[in-house]
Image: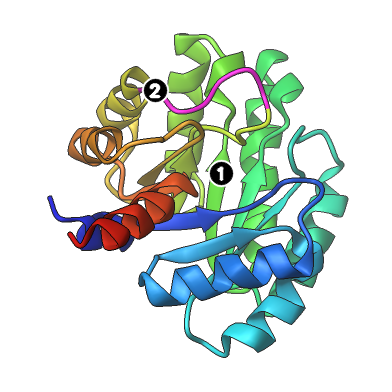
Amino acid sequence: MDVERILSMVDHTLLAQGATWDDIRQIVDDGIKYHCASVCIPASYVKQAAEYAAGGVKICTVIGFPNGYSTTETKCFEAADAVKNGADEVDMVINIGWLKDKKYDALLDEINRIKAACDGRLLKVIIETCLLTDEEKIKMCEIVSASNADYIKTSTGFSKGGATFEDIALFAQHIKPNIKIKAAGGISSLEDAEKFISLGASRLGTSRIVKIAKELEKEGN
């Protein structure tokens, strides 16, 4: 698989707490240059980034991030605000405590309410796999499959682990065809990216692939 195809599936991501506008602008420039699927940035930069990008790359942001325990109303406000500011895609974090409490109806309702607040934009549901049992991951596949969301996503990158091959294979086995898969967190090589895609991921949340592309350019490849 060539680097260009992999880059077309990358949500080029910078969510560090100390990210400055100069940092974000570089992410946007890279996203445009390397034809990434989107750039995933903090909500506070969405309006500025959307105006700067001028349609050259899709703008993605995160809500309820990274812990997921904001109220549903707060998450809906965040989603609507992000869309108003120019976000094309929204990545939400589930309430992990609700999952462990088996509040499945509340989880489904929250996802659907946030999707409605997205006003037609893509919604990706982050379930933070490193904190879940396989049974809980399968249950979330069922819930997201029954929802109006567009993607199930492994990780925030801010907990104790990121995407694993095993989790993407598990998603692919249990998610319905109407839902796509995003692997995020710890994707650090082209080989890993190819493996995640071969297992069923159609989006990759990472900054490393663009860095690799730049390194290859310097080497003349």
Please tell me which residue is depicted at 67% across the width and 24% down the height of the picture. 159
Mark 1 neighbour density, 10 Å: few (under 14) some (14–19) many (20 or more): many
Please tell me which residue is depicted at 22% across the width and 33% down the height of the picture. 195
- Position above or below: 54 against 156: below
Residue of label 2: 164
Q: Which is in the foreground here, disc 2 or disc 1?
A: 2
Q: Quadrant of residue 34?
A: bottom left
In the displayed structure image, the side of residue 55 where residue 22 appears, left or right: right
Main SS, magenta residues: loop
Q: Which residue reaches farthest left?
A: 1
Please tell me which residue is depicted at 51% across the width and 87% down the height of the picture. 55
Q: Looking at numbered disc 2 in the image, what kind of residue is underneath it?
A: Thr
Q: Where residue 79 sits in the image (x, y, percent)? A: 73, 62
Q: Which mark is residue 72?
A: none
Q: Does the stretch in magenta take in 14?
A: no
Task: Provide the secondary structure element on which disc 2 rests.
Answer: loop
Q: Where residue 144 sits in the image (x, y, percent)? A: 49, 40
Q: Which residues are the magenta region?
A: 159-164
Q: Quadrant of residue 168?
A: top left
Q: Where residue 68 sits in the image (x, y, percent)? A: 75, 36
Could one spot residue 179 in this view of the protein? no
Q: Which mark is residue 125?
A: 1
Which quarter of the image is occupied by the C terminus?
Answer: bottom left
Q: Looking at numbered disc 1 in the image, what kind of residue is underneath it?
A: Val
